[in-house]
Image (cartoon, rainbow, N blue to C red):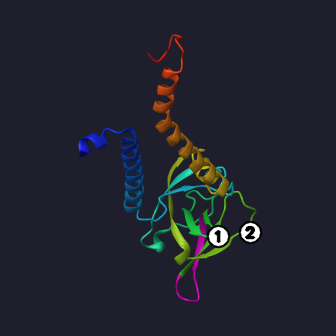
Amino acid sequence: MKFPEILKRGYVQTIIMIVVVILAVLLFWYGLRFAFRTEYPILAVASGSMEPILYKGDLIVVEGIENVSDIYVAPKDTEKPGDIVVYQGATELIVHRAIDKKIGTDGKIVFIIHGDANAEGANEHVHESKIIGRYVGFKVPWLGQIALAFQKTETKVAFIALWILVLIGIEAAPYLIKKLKGSNDGEPSLYK
């Protein structure tokens, strides 16, 4: 069988389309990582601790920070509030405001971080090495809910199973249509 004939087959075209989509997504993701200089250029807000600025499920854009001393620190109620930063918590990435900073015992910066909606005094001390990036001020409300849903294993399994069923359906449809055409016993057919 010649190469052009192989390319005309439905399953080969489906495989090619899947590969093209995967490559486009990877190119988009790695392009964003390069452009924003961070491993996490897009992030879903996982809690309401930054309300009313950011809500749970908002999808935010994050830029990397080359020099952490450039992070502006100030409480939320000041004329110019401090930067909203993303940092590595114990188990997940956290989005809170930098309200102050000090020099730690190792000579590095330690940021005092606070969620705008958290109780007063619920501050965290975050070493500069834990800072991932800074919120650039662009968000898409609710779109992050999709990413948050995919954190659950059950959702991932269900999504993969759905895609497998869709692909099987796409491949089986021509066969089923052909079978239906042949089994109409003289009845008028919609497929003629």
* Residue 129 appears anywhere in the view: yes
The first of marks 2 and 1 along the sequence is 1
Q: Quadrant of the N terminus?
A: top left
Say which residue appears at 42% left-offset and 56% top-offset.
Answer: 29
Q: Which residue is mark 1?
A: 91
Q: Is residue 105 one of those drawn in magenta?
A: yes
**Is 53 in front, or is 75?**
53
Q: Which amino acid type is marked by label 2? A: Gly
For label 2, the SS is loop
Residue bounds of the magenta highlight: 96-108
Q: Which amino acid type is marked by label 1? A: Thr
Q: Which residue is mark 2?
A: 121
Marking on residue 128: none
Residue 16 lies, in percent from the top left, at 36, 46
Residue 14 lies, in percent from the top left, at 40, 42
Say which residue appears at 52% left-offset and 41% top-offset.
Answer: 168
**Is 146 in front, or is 122?**
146
